[in-house]
Protein backbone atom coordinates (compact mmCIF):
# COMPACT_ATOMS: atom_id res chain seq x y z
CA UNK A 1 0.00 0.00 0.00
CA UNK A 2 2.84 2.38 0.81
CA UNK A 3 5.11 1.38 -2.09
CA UNK A 4 2.42 1.50 -4.79
CA UNK A 5 1.76 4.71 -6.72
CA UNK A 6 5.18 6.30 -6.29
CA UNK A 7 5.01 7.88 -9.77
CA UNK A 8 1.56 9.26 -8.98
CA UNK A 9 2.90 10.69 -5.74
CA UNK A 10 5.81 12.35 -7.56
CA UNK A 11 3.42 13.88 -10.12
CA UNK A 12 1.20 15.12 -7.31
CA UNK A 13 4.17 16.74 -5.61
CA UNK A 14 5.20 18.44 -8.85
CA UNK A 15 1.65 19.67 -9.38
CA UNK A 16 1.57 21.12 -5.87
CA UNK A 17 4.76 23.05 -6.57
CA UNK A 18 3.35 24.29 -9.88
CA UNK A 19 0.18 25.56 -8.22
CA UNK A 20 1.99 27.12 -5.29
CA UNK A 21 4.74 28.80 -7.32
CA UNK A 22 3.02 29.48 -10.65
CA UNK A 23 4.13 33.11 -10.49
CA UNK A 24 7.76 31.91 -10.59
CA UNK A 25 7.33 30.12 -13.92
CA UNK A 26 9.32 32.42 -16.25
CA UNK A 27 7.84 34.31 -19.17
CA UNK A 28 11.18 34.57 -20.94
CA UNK A 29 10.51 31.41 -22.94
CA UNK A 30 7.30 31.63 -24.95
CA UNK A 31 5.42 33.46 -22.16
CA UNK A 32 4.95 30.10 -20.44
CA UNK A 33 4.08 31.77 -17.15
CA UNK A 34 1.19 33.73 -18.63
CA UNK A 35 -0.02 30.68 -20.56
CA UNK A 36 -0.06 28.62 -17.36
CA UNK A 37 -1.86 31.34 -15.41
CA UNK A 38 -4.52 31.72 -18.11
CA UNK A 39 -5.72 28.17 -17.60
CA UNK A 40 -4.56 27.68 -14.00
CA UNK A 41 -7.99 26.63 -12.60
CA UNK A 42 -8.04 23.68 -15.00
CA UNK A 43 -5.16 22.07 -13.12
CA UNK A 44 -7.91 20.98 -10.77
CA UNK A 45 -8.82 18.36 -13.37
CA UNK A 46 -5.26 17.03 -13.24
CA UNK A 47 -5.57 16.80 -9.45
CA UNK A 48 -8.83 14.88 -9.88
CA UNK A 49 -7.25 12.49 -12.41
CA UNK A 50 -4.34 11.76 -10.08
CA UNK A 51 -6.78 11.20 -7.23
CA UNK A 52 -8.63 8.58 -9.29
CA UNK A 53 -5.35 6.85 -10.12
CA UNK A 54 -4.30 6.87 -6.46
CA UNK A 55 -7.60 5.32 -5.39
CA UNK A 56 -7.49 2.66 -8.12
CA UNK A 57 -3.89 1.82 -7.18
CA UNK A 58 -4.79 1.89 -3.48
CA UNK A 59 -1.72 3.97 -2.85
CA UNK A 60 -1.64 5.55 0.60
CA UNK A 61 1.54 7.44 -0.34
CA UNK A 62 -0.06 9.09 -3.36
CA UNK A 63 -3.23 9.95 -1.44
CA UNK A 64 -1.25 11.66 1.30
CA UNK A 65 0.87 13.64 -1.16
CA UNK A 66 -2.27 14.61 -3.10
CA UNK A 67 -3.50 16.51 -0.06
CA UNK A 68 -1.01 19.26 -0.93
CA UNK A 69 -2.28 20.14 -4.47
CA UNK A 70 -5.90 19.71 -3.33
CA UNK A 71 -5.50 22.18 -0.48
CA UNK A 72 -3.52 24.65 -2.62
CA UNK A 73 -6.11 24.52 -5.41
CA UNK A 74 -8.94 25.06 -2.93
CA UNK A 75 -7.06 28.00 -1.44
CA UNK A 76 -6.65 29.56 -4.89
CA UNK A 77 -10.05 28.82 -6.40
CA UNK A 78 -12.30 27.26 -3.79
CA UNK A 79 -13.92 30.60 -3.04
CA UNK A 80 -15.06 30.89 -6.65
CA UNK A 81 -17.15 27.74 -6.42
CA UNK A 82 -19.79 29.47 -4.29
CA UNK A 83 -22.22 32.31 -4.95
CA UNK A 84 -20.80 35.42 -3.28
CA UNK A 85 -23.47 37.84 -4.54
CA UNK A 86 -24.75 40.51 -2.17
CA UNK A 87 -28.01 42.42 -2.30
CA UNK A 88 -28.29 46.09 -3.21
CA UNK A 89 -26.42 48.21 -5.69
CA UNK A 90 -27.06 51.43 -7.60
CA UNK A 91 -26.65 50.44 -11.23
CA UNK A 92 -25.84 47.50 -13.49
CA UNK A 93 -23.11 47.32 -16.14
CA UNK A 94 -22.64 44.81 -18.93
CA UNK A 95 -19.84 44.12 -21.38
CA UNK A 96 -19.91 41.96 -24.49
CA UNK A 97 -17.50 41.18 -27.29
CA UNK A 98 -20.13 40.94 -30.02
CA UNK A 99 -17.75 39.32 -32.57
CA UNK A 100 -17.11 41.06 -35.88
CA UNK A 101 -18.46 37.98 -37.68
CA UNK A 102 -21.64 37.71 -35.59
CA UNK A 103 -24.32 36.23 -37.87
CA UNK A 104 -27.17 37.82 -35.88
CA UNK A 105 -26.27 41.31 -34.62
CA UNK A 106 -29.93 42.32 -34.30
CA UNK A 107 -30.69 39.29 -32.14
CA UNK A 108 -27.61 39.98 -30.04
CA UNK A 109 -28.73 43.57 -29.48
CA UNK A 110 -32.20 42.41 -28.46
CA UNK A 111 -30.68 39.97 -25.97
CA UNK A 112 -28.62 42.77 -24.45
CA UNK A 113 -31.66 45.01 -24.09
CA UNK A 114 -33.54 42.20 -22.32
CA UNK A 115 -30.71 41.97 -19.79
CA UNK A 116 -31.81 45.36 -18.46
CA UNK A 117 -28.41 46.83 -17.65
CA UNK A 118 -27.96 50.58 -17.22
CA UNK A 119 -24.65 50.71 -19.08
CA UNK A 120 -23.59 48.43 -21.94
CA UNK A 121 -20.11 48.22 -23.47
CA UNK A 122 -19.51 46.51 -26.81
CA UNK A 123 -16.19 45.35 -28.23
CA UNK A 124 -15.16 44.12 -31.68
CA UNK A 125 -17.81 46.36 -33.18
CA UNK A 126 -17.54 46.44 -37.00
CA UNK A 127 -17.93 49.86 -38.54
CA UNK A 128 -20.59 48.64 -40.96
CA UNK A 129 -22.69 47.14 -38.12
CA UNK A 130 -22.47 50.04 -35.69
CA UNK A 131 -25.65 51.72 -37.10
CA UNK A 132 -27.59 48.48 -36.61
CA UNK A 133 -26.56 48.18 -32.98
CA UNK A 134 -27.26 51.87 -32.44
CA UNK A 135 -30.77 51.48 -33.87
CA UNK A 136 -31.55 48.30 -31.92
CA UNK A 137 -30.29 49.74 -28.62
CA UNK A 138 -31.64 53.29 -29.05
CA UNK A 139 -34.94 52.81 -27.24
CA UNK A 140 -33.34 51.45 -24.06
CA UNK A 141 -30.17 53.55 -24.24
CA UNK A 142 -30.64 57.16 -25.38
CA UNK A 143 -26.95 58.00 -24.96
CA UNK A 144 -24.12 56.29 -26.76
CA UNK A 145 -20.64 56.88 -28.11
CA UNK A 146 -18.35 54.82 -30.33
CA UNK A 147 -14.58 55.11 -30.68
CA UNK A 148 -12.98 52.79 -33.22
CA UNK A 149 -14.21 49.26 -32.59
CA UNK A 150 -15.54 49.80 -29.05
CA UNK A 151 -18.72 51.52 -27.97
CA UNK A 152 -20.68 52.53 -24.88
CA UNK A 153 -24.47 52.69 -24.51
CA UNK A 154 -26.04 54.27 -21.44
CA UNK A 155 -29.33 55.25 -19.81
CA UNK A 156 -27.46 58.24 -18.38
CA UNK A 157 -25.73 61.18 -20.14
CA UNK A 158 -22.16 60.77 -21.35
CA UNK A 159 -19.49 63.46 -21.23
CA UNK A 160 -15.74 63.58 -21.66
CA UNK A 161 -15.77 60.90 -24.36
CA UNK A 162 -12.37 60.25 -25.88
CA UNK A 163 -10.28 57.42 -27.30
CA UNK A 164 -7.59 55.84 -25.15
CA UNK A 165 -4.24 55.11 -26.75
CA UNK A 166 -3.23 51.51 -26.00
CA UNK A 167 -0.33 51.44 -28.50
CA UNK A 168 -2.04 49.55 -31.27
CA UNK A 169 -2.13 52.04 -34.12
CA UNK A 170 -5.92 52.07 -34.22
CA UNK A 171 -8.61 52.72 -31.61
CA UNK A 172 -9.69 49.78 -29.43
CA UNK A 173 -10.24 51.59 -26.14
CA UNK A 174 -12.23 54.59 -24.96
CA UNK A 175 -13.14 56.56 -21.87
CA UNK A 176 -16.34 58.41 -20.92
CA UNK A 177 -17.82 60.00 -17.82
CA UNK A 178 -21.29 58.63 -17.07
CA UNK A 179 -23.57 60.94 -15.06
CA UNK A 180 -25.43 58.38 -12.94
CA UNK A 181 -28.08 59.54 -10.43
CA UNK A 182 -25.62 58.60 -7.69
CA UNK A 183 -22.65 60.53 -9.05
CA UNK A 184 -20.21 60.59 -11.97
CA UNK A 185 -18.40 57.41 -12.96
CA UNK A 186 -15.42 57.15 -15.31
CA UNK A 187 -16.08 54.18 -17.60
CA UNK A 188 -13.31 52.65 -19.69
CA UNK A 189 -14.07 50.23 -22.51
CA UNK A 190 -11.16 48.22 -23.89
CA UNK A 191 -10.43 45.36 -26.25
CA UNK A 192 -6.84 44.29 -25.81
CA UNK A 193 -5.02 42.45 -28.64
CA UNK A 194 -5.66 38.77 -29.12
CA UNK A 195 -3.16 36.12 -28.04
CA UNK A 196 -2.22 32.90 -29.79
CA UNK A 197 -0.42 29.69 -28.89
CA UNK A 198 2.10 28.80 -31.61
CA UNK A 199 4.45 25.82 -31.73
CA UNK A 200 7.58 27.84 -32.53
CA UNK A 201 6.70 31.08 -30.72
CA UNK A 202 4.81 29.90 -27.64
CA UNK A 203 2.20 32.21 -26.12
CA UNK A 204 2.32 35.27 -28.39
CA UNK A 205 1.07 37.94 -26.00
CA UNK A 206 3.62 40.74 -26.44
CA UNK A 207 1.27 43.25 -28.06
CA UNK A 208 -1.44 42.52 -25.52
CA UNK A 209 0.99 43.04 -22.65
CA UNK A 210 2.09 46.42 -24.04
CA UNK A 211 -1.55 47.48 -24.51
CA UNK A 212 -2.35 46.42 -20.93
CA UNK A 213 0.48 48.61 -19.62
CA UNK A 214 -0.85 51.60 -21.57
CA UNK A 215 -4.38 50.98 -20.32
CA UNK A 216 -3.11 50.73 -16.76
CA UNK A 217 -1.34 54.08 -17.14
CA UNK A 218 -4.53 55.73 -18.43
CA UNK A 219 -6.60 54.40 -15.53
CA UNK A 220 -3.95 55.45 -13.01
CA UNK A 221 -4.16 59.00 -14.37
CA UNK A 222 -7.97 59.15 -14.09
CA UNK A 223 -9.17 62.08 -11.95
CA UNK A 224 -12.62 60.77 -11.05
CA UNK A 225 -12.83 58.72 -7.87
CA UNK A 226 -15.20 56.03 -9.19
CA UNK A 227 -13.87 54.03 -12.14
CA UNK A 228 -15.23 51.03 -14.06
CA UNK A 229 -13.34 49.03 -16.68
CA UNK A 230 -15.41 46.98 -19.12
CA UNK A 231 -13.97 44.89 -21.87
CA UNK A 232 -12.30 41.92 -23.44
CA UNK A 233 -8.81 41.91 -21.95
CA UNK A 234 -7.79 38.63 -23.61
CA UNK A 235 -6.38 37.54 -20.28
CA UNK A 236 -7.46 36.32 -16.87
CA UNK A 237 -6.99 37.92 -13.47
CA UNK A 238 -4.27 35.35 -12.73
CA UNK A 239 -2.13 36.50 -15.66
CA UNK A 240 0.79 38.54 -14.32
CA UNK A 241 1.06 40.42 -17.62
CA UNK A 242 -2.13 42.33 -16.76
CA UNK A 243 -0.73 43.49 -13.41
CA UNK A 244 -0.65 47.15 -14.48
CA UNK A 245 -4.47 46.98 -14.53
CA UNK A 246 -5.28 44.27 -11.98
CA UNK A 247 -3.01 45.75 -9.30
CA UNK A 248 -5.13 48.90 -9.07
CA UNK A 249 -8.62 47.54 -9.73
CA UNK A 250 -10.90 44.89 -8.28
CA UNK A 251 -12.51 42.12 -10.31
CA UNK A 252 -16.26 41.89 -9.75
CA UNK A 253 -16.17 38.19 -10.61
CA UNK A 254 -13.56 37.42 -8.00
CA UNK A 255 -15.30 39.54 -5.36
CA UNK A 256 -19.00 38.75 -5.79
CA UNK A 257 -19.27 36.25 -8.64
CA UNK A 258 -21.12 32.97 -8.85
CA UNK A 259 -18.84 30.15 -9.96
CA UNK A 260 -15.82 30.53 -12.21
CA UNK A 261 -17.60 32.89 -14.59
CA UNK A 262 -15.80 31.64 -17.70
CA UNK A 263 -16.80 33.71 -20.73
CA UNK A 264 -14.88 32.29 -23.71
CA UNK A 265 -15.39 30.46 -25.98
CA UNK A 266 -19.18 30.59 -25.74
CA UNK A 267 -19.59 27.01 -27.00
CA UNK A 268 -17.47 25.67 -24.12
CA UNK A 269 -16.37 28.48 -21.77
CA UNK A 270 -12.83 27.75 -20.61
CA UNK A 271 -11.44 31.09 -19.43
CA UNK A 272 -12.65 34.40 -18.02
CA UNK A 273 -11.15 36.89 -20.45
CA UNK A 274 -14.10 39.34 -20.48
CA UNK A 275 -13.74 41.50 -17.41
CA UNK A 276 -15.60 44.00 -15.27
CA UNK A 277 -13.26 45.75 -12.87
CA UNK A 278 -13.84 48.61 -10.46
CA UNK A 279 -11.98 51.19 -8.42
CA UNK A 280 -13.65 53.34 -5.78
CA UNK A 281 -16.86 51.32 -6.24
CA UNK A 282 -18.29 48.37 -4.28
CA UNK A 283 -19.33 45.38 -6.43
CA UNK A 284 -22.51 43.67 -5.23
CA UNK A 285 -22.98 40.83 -7.71
CA UNK A 286 -21.50 39.52 -10.96
CA UNK A 287 -22.70 36.93 -13.47
CA UNK A 288 -22.50 35.68 -17.05
CA UNK A 289 -25.45 35.84 -19.43
CA UNK A 290 -26.74 33.26 -21.93
CA UNK A 291 -25.06 32.79 -25.29
CA UNK A 292 -25.80 35.26 -28.10
CA UNK A 293 -24.62 35.16 -31.71
CA UNK A 294 -21.08 35.92 -30.52
CA UNK A 295 -18.25 33.55 -29.60
CA UNK A 296 -18.09 35.27 -26.18
CA UNK A 297 -20.64 35.28 -23.37
CA UNK A 298 -21.84 38.67 -22.07
CA UNK A 299 -20.88 39.41 -18.47
CA UNK A 300 -22.65 41.79 -16.10
CA UNK A 301 -22.30 43.21 -12.59
CA UNK A 302 -24.34 45.19 -10.09
CA UNK A 303 -22.35 48.03 -8.53
CA UNK A 304 -22.74 50.43 -5.61
CA UNK A 305 -21.21 53.89 -5.44
CA UNK A 306 -19.84 55.19 -2.15
Image (cartoon, helix red, strand yellow):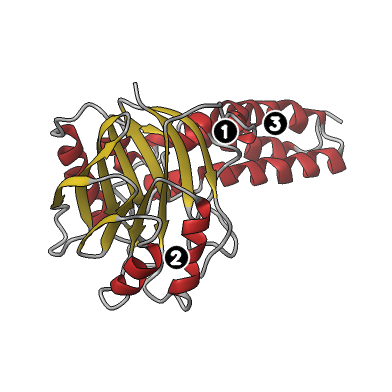
Identify the mark nearer the N-term, 3 or 2: 3
Q: Is residue 264 left or right of residue 78?
A: left
Which mark, residue 66? 3
Q: Nearer the viewer, residue 10 or 95?
A: 95
Q: Are marks 3 and 1 in contact (CB under 8 Å)?
A: no
**Residue 22 at what x, y percent from top left?**
45, 36
**Residue 95 at what x, y percent from top left?**
40, 51
Question: Label 1's element?
Answer: helix
Residue 73 visible from this viewpoint: no
> Image height check: is 250 above or below 262?
above
Identify the mark nearer the N-term, 2 or 1: 1
Q: Which residue is mark 2?
A: 109
**Residue 255 at what x, y percent from top left?**
48, 29
Neighbour tally class for label 2: few under 14, some 14-19, many 20 plus, Cα within 10 Å: some
Q: Which residue is mark 1?
A: 77
Question: Label 3's element?
Answer: helix
The image quarter containing residue 215 is top left
Neighbour tally class for label 1: few under 14, some 14-19, many 20 plus, Cα within 10 Å: some
**Residue 101 at what x, y percent from top left?**
40, 76
Quadrant including the N terminus:
top right
Question: Label 2's element?
Answer: helix
Which mark, residue 99? none
Q: Nearer the viewer, residue 230 or 195?
A: 230
Q: Nearer the viewer, mark 2 or mark 1?
A: 2
Amino acid sequence: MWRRGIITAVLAGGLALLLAFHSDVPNRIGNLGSLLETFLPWLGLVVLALLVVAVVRRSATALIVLLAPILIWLNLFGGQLTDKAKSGGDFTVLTHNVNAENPDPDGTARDLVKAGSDIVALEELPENQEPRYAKDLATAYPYHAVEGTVGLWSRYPLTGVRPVDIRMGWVRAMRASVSTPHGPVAVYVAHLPSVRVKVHAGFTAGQRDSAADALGDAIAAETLHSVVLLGDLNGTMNDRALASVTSQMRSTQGAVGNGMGFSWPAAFPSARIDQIMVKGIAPRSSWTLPKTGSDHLPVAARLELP
